[in-house]
Each structure stands twice: as C-alpha cells, then as structure tokens.
Amino acid sequence: MACETADTTTTEPREGPYAVPDRTPEASPAREYVETKPPRGVYVRVFIYVVATHVLLAFMSLLVVVAKTR
C-alpha cells in the first residue's frame, strides 16, 4: 500500500477561512509595540515569594526558640 500525501506546493490563492487578504500599498505599517512595565503577574509572584520567605524565617526562628528552651 502506498501512502498518498497532499501536495502543499501550489501557488494558487487560498479560499475560505485560510484566505490571505490582499495587501494594499497605501496601508499604514503596524506600530511597534514597546513594553514599558512588567506584567502584573511578576508583582504577584514577587509578593508571594516575599511572604513565603518571611513565614519560613519566622518558623525557623520559632524552632530555634523551642530548641533552646529544652
């Protein structure tokens, strides 16, 4: 049995949902996107890390206090 593959090297214009719209020469170029501030997720992650670090240090300090009293 031979396996048939689709010929994808045609240069005919596509039709349907995959059609490429015609480019007009008078269309303005796309504006360049410049990100001026980090995404909000970075602030949330840093806040969680800071809180987790403080909780960990407090727990370790509590363990030291309990170990010294015995």
Image (cartoon, grey):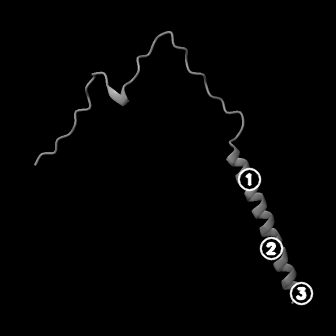
The residue most toward the top is 26
- Residue ID at (44%, 16%): 23
Q: CA distance from mark 1 to mark 3?
A: 35 Å
- Crowd band around label 3 with a 10 angstrom C-alpha radius: few (<14), some (14–19), many (20+): few
Judged left or right of residue 28, residue 44 is right
Judged left or right of residue 22, residue 69 is right
Residue at disc 3, secondary structure: helix
The residue most toward the left is 1
- First of labels 2, 1 by sequence position: 1
Pointer 1 residue: 46
Q: Amino acid at mark 3?
A: Thr
Residue at disc 2, secondary structure: helix
Q: Amino acid at mark 1?
A: Val
Pointer 2 residue: 59
Tell me which corner region of the image, top left, top right, bottom left or bottom right, holds residue 30.
top right
- First of labels 1, 3 by sequence position: 1
User: Does 50 appear above or below 61?
Assistant: above
Q: Are marks 1 and 3 in contact (CB under 8 Å)?
A: no
User: Does 29 appear above or below 8?
Assistant: above
Pointer 3 residue: 69
Q: Nearer the viewer, residue 67 or 1?
A: 1
- Where is residue 52? Give x, y as percent: 75, 63
- Where is residue 10? Give x, y as percent: 25, 26
Residue at disc 1, secondary structure: helix
Q: Amino acid at mark 2?
A: Phe
- Residue ID at (12%, 45%): 2
Q: Which mark is residue 68?
A: none
Q: Are marks 2 and 3 in contact (CB under 8 Å)?
A: no
- Residue ID at (50%, 9%): 26
Total labels: the figure holds: 3
- Crowd band around label 1 with a 10 angstrom C-alpha radius: few (<14), some (14–19), many (20+): few
